[in-house]
Amino acid sequence: MKKRVVVGMSGGVDSSVAAYLMQQQGYEVIGLFMKNWHDGSVTIQGDCPWVDDSNDALLVAQKLGIAFQTLDLSTEYKARIVDYMFAEYEAGRTPNPDVLCNREIKFDIFLKHALAIGADYVATGHYCRKSSFDKNGKEIFQLLAGKDGNKDQSYFLCQLNQQQLSKALFPIGEMLKPEVRKIAKEIGLITAEKKDSQGLCFIGKVRLPDFLQQQLQPKKGNVILIPDNESIHHTFQFDNFCDEQLFSLTKKNNFKSTDGKIIGEHNGAHFYTIGQRKGIKIGGFKNPLFVIETDTKENIIYLGEGETHFGLNRPGLFIAENDIHFIRDDLRLGIGEQQTYKARIRYRQALDECCLYRRKEGLYVIFKHLQKGIAPGQFCAWYNEDELVGSGIIA
């Protein structure tokens, strides 16, 4: 009897080819499109709106001769992703909805639905890989980076657990993007030349200020420029970055309004994020201005001039105890333990050496080199070679 796999079909070329490959491997394939959003008022039209995506997914399923379903998860998506985004921005934090979408929607609600209709696995079009090995009679699953380094999406899956990984398949993880498009073209899929989707998971590209203004109202506030501290050398690296003395450098800047001078106004501190350069709309400076801190309580944004500004660059970060996540429990650090890995704080960022040090209050991550634009709410993910070991929400 054939094993059944439900493929999350987004209407793009990657998930289309994933469905085809599952079919070629002998699975009974069901394509499923998740409808997560109805409001087109904040979506930039022409940039993969969900209606077009759904139609493309249906046409691919018909071409492959597989069953197809549409699952409306808009209520759950709003509760778990959209409301979370609003709350995070309002608190002055920078959420990553794509990471949450995978943890809360694709590999939770979608996975449960797939299992309920008799699926043995779910498959997605992510550029990542899965492996496993036996340890003391128990199968341990590993999440590995995709073969295509330019498209690797393992970061977006950094919050998955063993149970979720055990049911997941990533058919295109061993392939390069041009290979995926070549297959789609050879078998005549309508999505073969379709551009990659951008923006929020299953919503599309949105005007973020318009999106946030659905619940967060504009509010005039001061823009304060913080002078650089020339006594701090910006290009240094730590020879011993597993050093507890560096823990204090993981704290936020906590600037005060008296630390700089007012150079303009903004429309709401919750509309800005640390490291942001575009949308500031203040000129007259030799070097570009960057947001180095936001204060949503006082409604102030703090700027620094130039990419080497001390307020923009920090050697490390902190993850609170409840926000630490290890994909493999056998690699979880005990209190007082430390381990070197390579980590990134955003998608497509180059990995950098770091030291993880577990304390009672949480996890300190100290990098070998300064990191630009560390923002609370983002996810830090750490790797051992090409295996994603764990992740956490930056405090």
Image: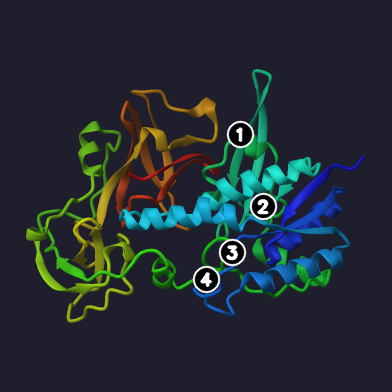
Per the model, the C-alpha gap separating discs 1 and 2 is: 18 Å
Residue 358: image x %, image y %? 35, 29
Which of discs 1 and 2 lies nearer the camera? The answer is: 1
The tag earlier along the polypeptide, 3 or 1, is 3
Q: Residue at x 36, y 23 (%)?
A: 335
Question: Which element type, helix, strand or loop, lies under badge 3?
Answer: loop
The residue identified by callout 4 is 205
Which of discs 4 and 3 lies nearer the camera? The answer is: 3
The residue identified by callout 1 is 162
Please indicate, yes or no, whether residue 124 appears anywhere in the rendered image: yes
The residue identified by callout 2 is 173
Disc number placed over residue 37 in the picture, else none: 3
The residue closer to the viewer here, 35 or 193, is 35
The tag earlier along the polypeptide, 4 or 2, is 2
Q: What residue type is disc 2 on? A: Gly
The tag earlier along the polypeptide, 1 or 2, is 1
Per the model, the C-alpha gap separating discs 3 and 2 is: 27 Å
The tag earlier along the polypeptide, 4 or 1, is 1
- Give the class, few, some or many, for how many residues have Cα within 10 Å of label 2's Cα (few <14, many ≥20): many
Q: Residue at x 26, y 67 (%)?
A: 290
The residue closer to the viewer here, 239 or 216, is 216
Residue 38: image x %, image y %? 59, 67
Q: Quick one: which residue is furthest to the right in this view?
A: 1
The residue closer to the viewer here, 178 or 154, is 154
Q: Is residue 271 above or below residue 253?
A: below
Q: What residue type is disc 1 on? A: Gln
Per the model, the C-alpha gap separating discs 4 and 2 is: 25 Å
Q: Give the side of residue 42 with respect to residue 309, left or right.
A: right
